[in-house]
Image (spheres, rainbow, N blue to C red):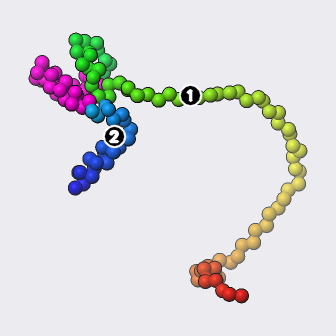
Amino acid sequence: MKKTVAIFFMCIYMLSFSEMHQFLRIPVLIQHFVEHRQLDPSVSLLSFLNEHYIHQYIIDADYQRDNQLPFRHADCCAVTTALNCECPAIPFIELPVRTTEIKNEFILHDEDSHTLLSIADIFQPPRCA
């Protein structure tokens, strides 16, 4: 059950961050891997993925077939535009500095004489006047 839920959430995650039609090309990936295995039986899946996705694209005899693989290139793209403008300089006005000091006095209560129940006194039901 945990494995099924994990696969479900992984699919939702993958579908939310990628193009859906790329997943429809996964059979092409499997078929192309089988074609490579027929040419060279020593090709593993990791070496196939390494050749087609990690390294630079090599233009060879099956380059057109390689471009049909999923996630090879982005078909849908988003265009974002940023507008930068230079704001005019604003002159700052210097304010006079205060020379008098203000003393703050804090009155500390003796917290040792209060019980924890006195803090709960504020949490009481409302009373009618």
Image vertical order of residue 10 relative to residue 56, above or below? below
Image vertical order of residue 36 relative to residue 61, above or below? below
Q: CA distance from mark 1 to mark 2?
A: 27 Å
Q: Is residue 46 visible?
A: no
Q: Is residue 21 visible?
A: yes
Mark 2, other Cα within 10 Å: few <14 / some 14–19 / many ≥20: few
Three-letter amino acid code at disc 2? Met
Image marks 1 and 2: residues in contact by CB distance under 8 Å: no
Left or right of 67, for residue 82: right
* Residue at position x 56%, y 28% in the image: 81
* Residue at position x 27%, y 33% in the image: 24
**On the image, numbered disc 1 is attached to which residue?**
81
Furthest residue toward bottom: 129
**On the image, numbered disc 2 is attached to which residue?**
14
Left or right of 4, for residue 99: right
Three-letter amino acid code at disc 1? Thr
Secondary structure mostly taken by the magenta-highlighted segment of the chain:
helix
Q: Which residues are magenta?
A: 25-53
Q: Secondary structure at mark 2?
A: helix
Looking at the picture, how far across and down is residue 109, in whole percent?
A: 70, 76
Q: Earlier in the sequence, mark 1 or mark 2?
A: 2
For the residue pair 67 and 113, the one nearer the viewer reads as 67
The quarter of the displayed image where residue 119 is located: bottom right
